[in-house]
Amino acid sequence: MRVPDQRNVRNLLLKALPAEAFQKLTGDGSLIELPARHVLVEADQPNEDVCFIEDGLASMVAANGDDEAVEVGHIGLDGMSGLHVLLRTDTTPNRTFVQVAGSGVRVSVKSFSQVLAEFPAADELFLKYMHCCDIQLAQSALANGRYNMHERLARWLLMCHDRLSGDDLPLTHELLAIMLGVRRAGVTNELHVIEGLRAIRSTRANVRILDRDRLEEIAAGCYGVPEREYQRLIGLPIRRPTNRHS
């Protein structure tokens, strides 16, 4: 499908690009459907394109030979898959896949590399985005080391809420466990804790946000730093407005 014009794209990086760079980047691009579990980047394999998420949610996952895996990057309409291409690297040991179905703008690596070379402002924008991803990863490490499970879960739900339309998050307990690197039973128990605080309503394959203000209180200090840094550097907000943050 044809890529929307820049005024109508939802992806914040595409919106923030200089107009000429956007035209060059999307000249041979296409709008594609992204079904759940679709692989955007396979570990240790060169990819021919990068994808700017328009709708839905993708995760970059680090794994080892013992089949242990944890999310190291959270990608929605704020970002893109294939960050290693930005660093002029052909492959990465990390895998990126779609966790919530949606759509995205697919662009060839060749076109992306040409835009980086021809438009310094675009190259600077994407490097700023890389910095934001580094901050997100650093804050995840901080959350894992210094915050309780229900606080970490609240942070992750807020990040999903920022990147998805509406208040219903189509997330299974199994997926939440993989993303947080914990046992499924632990996720179920912590969802019940947050539900008891009336911030969410959880069912088998869906989490509905009832009170975002309350969810931010539960997440405490482990949510907000990457979101502020993204708005400061990219110039567009990723954080959802609440009664306190409007």
Image (tube, rainbow, N blue to C red):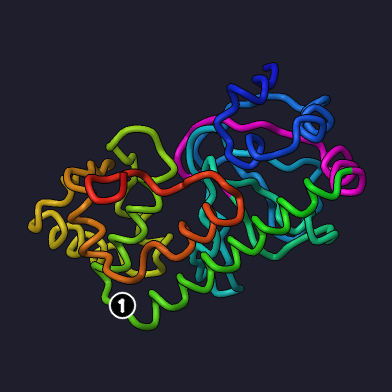
Q: Position of residue 91 (x, y in %)?
A: 79, 59
Residue at (51%, 67%) from the top-left corner? 69
Q: In this view, does 40 lie to the left or right of 90?
A: left
Direction top: furthest residue: 2
The quadrant the N terminus occupies is: top right
Q: Is residue 204 left or right of residue 6?
A: left
Q: Residues within 10 Å of mark 1 (few under 14, many from 20)?
A: some
Q: Where is residue 135 in the image (x, y as percent from the top left)?
A: 55, 68
Residue at (67%, 20%) from the top-left corner? 5
Give the residue at mark 1: 147
Query: Is 114 located above or below residue 197 in the figure?
Result: above
The quadrant in which residue 242 appears is top left
Query: Is 167 located above or below residue 28 in the figure?
Result: below
Residue at (17%, 43%) from the top-left corner? 210
Any magenta on residue 196? Answer: no
**In what element is the residue under mark 1?**
loop
Query: Is 38 located above or below residue 141 in the figure?
Result: above
Residue at (75%, 36%) from the top-left corner? 18
- Magenta residues? 97-118
The amino acid sitting under disc 1 is Tyr
Q: Where is residue 40 in the image (x, y as percent from the top left)?
A: 65, 44
Q: Nearer the viewer, residue 189 or 152?
A: 152
Q: Which of 180 and 165 is in front in this view?
A: 165
The quadrant the C terminus occupies is: top left
Q: Where is residue 3 in the image (x, y as percent from the top left)?
A: 68, 21
